[in-house]
Image (cartoon, rainbow, N blue to C red):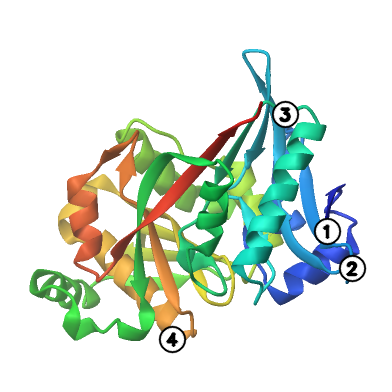
Amino acid sequence: MISVIKTDIESDLEWKEFLRNQYNLFFDYKFNSYNDVFNKKIKWHHLKFKDSDSNKVLAIMIGCEKSSEDKKIYNSCEGVSFGGFLWKKKINLIKFIEITESFIDYLRLNNFNKCILKNPPFLYNKNPNEETEYALIKNGFRVSSVSVSNIIDLENFEFRKISEPKKRSIRKTLKKIDLEIVSEDLTEENFAEYYEILFENRKLKGVYPTHSFEELIYLKKNFKNEIILFSAKLDSKVVAVCFLFSINREMILNFYLADDEKYKMERVSEFILYKSIEWAKENNFKYYDTGTSDSGGKLIDGLFAFKKNFLANGFLRKSFELDIN
């Protein structure tokens, strides 16, 4: 039998112990806390799933409660890229199904009308497989939307394998662009130059960065080693930035890559992407997620092709939904 327990992840020692064995940045209270610090008014509803016989935690889930059209919705999760279940290593399909069933029972008991789970690509699992999705589908969940994320298998990544035009571009920029991993403590003053590159780049695309100026400083201060900031300089001027989020010891996520439009022809984005991939491989990560290549349900052809040139294959981020009777 599975017990489903709502918990406060700031103080829950079992939650912290679980993360020690299968860490995921987005399930860490230190990361999620930025939503509260900056008053996003998210009504949290985090859950842990325990085996009643062994009293061991078999899975956890970050989640929140939302309302829409008089419906009470469980959403995993706001404030992060994805949520869903985070599973204990080496449990099997039978347990996946049992835990999913207990989750649905919990939703019914707590009068939820709908559930939305935003899952990462299956490569994010410690034991990559699609058994967990099978458990969801067999219990009535449906895939409501998909997005494609380009992920590089770093074991097979080599400079010689990327496209010839990209290799020529990188060799050319190596001679004139200085790369720096920003290690200094960030303040509003010294961070402004980096954030301006990101803000103006996204503004040209008609969007804004996911995180505000203050939020990104807060996260970087909280995660000095897990959030890595790369800066590319040309003639002492910052012309591109890249923010990597270390999700766990195997997976690193390129959350932001942005360049100064005035230096587009210098191919600085290609340079900083390559150098950050190289850094991830040297630091023994297994996978490098370059991020999604679609927006609003439409594939951005040029962006997808750009990433494929760096040996990044497409994997699905799926959202699952369940209507609860």
Give the residue pinned by disc 4.
Answer: 282
**For the residue labelled by badge 4, is the local secondary structure a helix, a strand or a loop?**
helix
Give the quadrant of residue 69: top right
Q: Sort mark 2 into few (<14), some (14-19) or many (20+) by Cα contacts within 10 Å.
A: few
**How far apart are the two marked residues, 3 and 2, measured between alpha carbons?**
27 Å
Tell me the mark number nearer the camera, choosing from 4 and 1.
1
Residue that appears at 63% across and 45% down: 215
Residue 250 position, x and y percent, is 52, 76
Residue 300 position, x and y percent, is 23, 44
Above or below, 275 against 122 in this view is below
- Amino acid bearing label 1: Met
Residues at badges 1 and 2 in contact (C-beta under 8 Å)?
yes
Residue 251 located left or right of residue 113: left
Label drawn at residue 273: none
Residue 279 position, x and y percent, is 42, 79
Residues at badges 3 and 4 in contact (C-beta under 8 Å)?
no
Instruction: Point out the tag, 1 or 3, that comes first from the N-terminus.
Output: 1
Tell me the mark number nearer the camera, choosing from 2 and 4.
2
Instruction: Point out the tag, 1 or 2, that comes first from the N-terminus.
Output: 1
Give the residue pinned by disc 3.
Answer: 112
**How far apart are the two marked residues, 3 and 4, measured between alpha carbons?**
46 Å
Label drawn at residue 1: 1
Point out the image quarter for the N terminus. Answer: bottom right
Residues at badges 1 and 3 in contact (C-beta under 8 Å)?
no
Give the residue pinned by disc 2.
Answer: 53
Q: Nearer the viewer, residue 276 or 89?
A: 89
Residue that appears at 56% across and 59% down: 132
Residue 6 located left or right of residue 249: right
